Amino acid sequence: MMDDPPCSIERALCVVGERWTFLVLREALAGRTRFAEFRDALGIAPDVLSDRLNTLVDYGVLAREPYQEPGRRTRHAYRITPAGRELAVVLGALQQWGDQHLPRPSGPTIVRRRRGTDEPLHVGFVGADGREVPLADAEGVRTAVHPARLAAR
């Protein structure tokens, strides 16, 4: 489906790197499943939506399931998969960053809370011991050199 970039961030962006893709995911995580629901909620052009949905299905983020209303032709619903549900953390991190660095004067439109409580949640790095690691103590360490960088040396 895609070349095999060595960087997992680059590979992930090949699937979810389009603006509309994250907005489609937001709606899927909120329970929307039908093409018309996505289109109406987002105001997205049908061809762009179709492309984004197909990419998400191709990479196992959404699953396409046929359905038929009485007297109508068969259509498809789009159900979030476990891989898609894991992207809620990525969306939460984007929301958290946006709330902090691009705040709305009226405040956030969504607040993350632990289900069944009023405990606020935030996204962070968690160590093997289950405790949050301060951002200043988290680092990304390269484990391999990209072939294009080796050629440039």
Image (cartoon, rainbow, N blue to C red):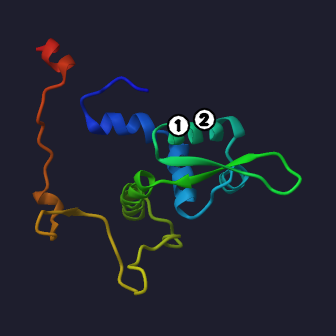
- Where is residue 113 shown, x and y percent of the image? 40, 78
Quadrant into which the C terminus falls: top left
Residue found 36% across the figure and 23% down from its top:
3
Of 117 and 102, which appears nearest the observer?
117
Query: Residue 136 placed where, x, y %?
Result: 13, 59
From the viewer's side, name the closer residue of 71 and 108. Answer: 71
Circle 1: residue type: Thr
Residue 93, percent across and down?
36, 59
Tally the marks: 2
- Asked whether, in this view, residue 23 is left or right of residue 113, the answer is right
In the rendered image of this protein, does residue 114 appear above or below residue 86?
below
Query: Image quadrant of residue 59?
Result: top left
Residue type at mark 2 is Asp
Q: Which residue is mark 2?
A: 51
- The residue shown at (31%, 26%) is 4
Residues at discs 1 and 2 in contact (Cβ within 8 Å): yes
Pointer 1 residue: 55
Q: Secondary structure at mark 1?
A: helix
Where does the image place residue 53, in percent across and percent down from the top left? 58, 42
